[in-house]
Amino acid sequence: MRYRIISGNASIDLAKQIARELDVELSEAKVGRFSDGEIQVKIVDNVRGEYCFVIQSTSTPVNENLMELLIIADALKRASAKKITAVVPYYGYGRQDRKSEPRVPITARLVANLFATAGITRVLTMDLHAGQIQGFFDIPVDHLYSRPVLLNYFENEKLNDVVIVSPDAGGVERARSFAKYFNAELAIVDKRRPRPNEASIMNIIGEVKNKTCIILDDLIDTAGTLTKVAEAVKSKGAVKVLAAATHGVFSGDAKRKIQNSCIEKVVVTDSILLSQDAFTKKIKVISIAPILAEAIIRISNNESISALFD
């Protein structure tokens, strides 16, 4: 089956890696701006009757990248593409997934509606902030996990006496799954968040003394929670503190916090293209291009995606 790989500006490097994995050329699409800042898109290649995969994380600047994705999808729809799959490694606006207090939006649902309106017929994404976001879509969603690539990295590190630390109650399922495959123990941090992007550590459930702790989360934003959890486990006797997350958002002064923390290394994937000033000696980026490429092949061949994680 013929298919096209198209990229917006947010994930061009990742799209090129995926195209190499698939041994195909990246289809040409001109994604620019009019003089007033409006997004201008032209699909150069003929896509009539084709299966199109648009690679675009809705990361910073999230509004720009989201609109790019929607406009590219609209262009493909009007060019008579047969199927349009949005490959969104990082799904922005996913943190507002419920009404946690009065008079707040559910942006995760709003964006899902926008995808369908733009003509997207399928979504391929990775490590959603909450798994139930899949239910907001009225189109098929294939939800991938970065666990295989993260596990492979840490297994090669030959670590001893490992404890996987969930930084909050919401991440327990993720951490438990990782601990099971890694054959490691589990610890949970009881966290209170008085305001957005601000956390205070309360208690640590589980034994971390004389252990190597891997703090596991879906994303790292300001790194406030991460560094406080690291300090907490270190104060409880952890001999080594590492961290891993699928999405390295690294907003605000996250770089400085990580650099000045007791964390020895932070491992993230390339689901978000990092700016050059986001890198420190402590940040390690590993690629999810192979797993995304394999998922694209399986979707194209109507094969099982879940088999990737068996």
Image: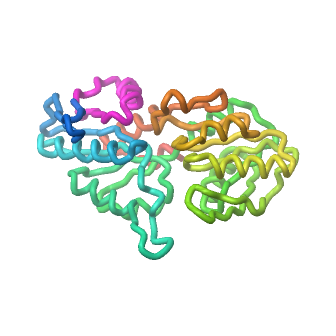
**Quarter of the view holding residue 294:** top left
Give the residue drawn at x 71%, y 44%. 214
Give the residue drawn at x 51%, y 46%. 145
Q: Is residue 285 magenta?
A: no
x, y (%) of residue 36? Answer: 21, 39
* Closer-to-camera residue (26/142): 26
Scheme of image coloration = rainbow
x, y (%) of residue 201? Answer: 73, 59
Residue lying at the far front in this picture: please name it. Answer: 36
* Closer-to-camera residue (180/125): 125
Query: On the picture, is 130 further left or further right than 41?
Result: right
Report whether residue 51 is seen. no
Give the residue drawn at x 25%, y 50%. 120
Give the residue drawn at x 63%, y 42%. 244
Q: Is residue 2 magenta?
A: yes
* Closer-to-camera residue (277/88): 277
The range drawn in magenta is 1-29
**Quarter of the view holding residue 81:** top left
* Closer-to-camera residue (4/197): 197
In the image, is residue 290 above or below residue 203? above
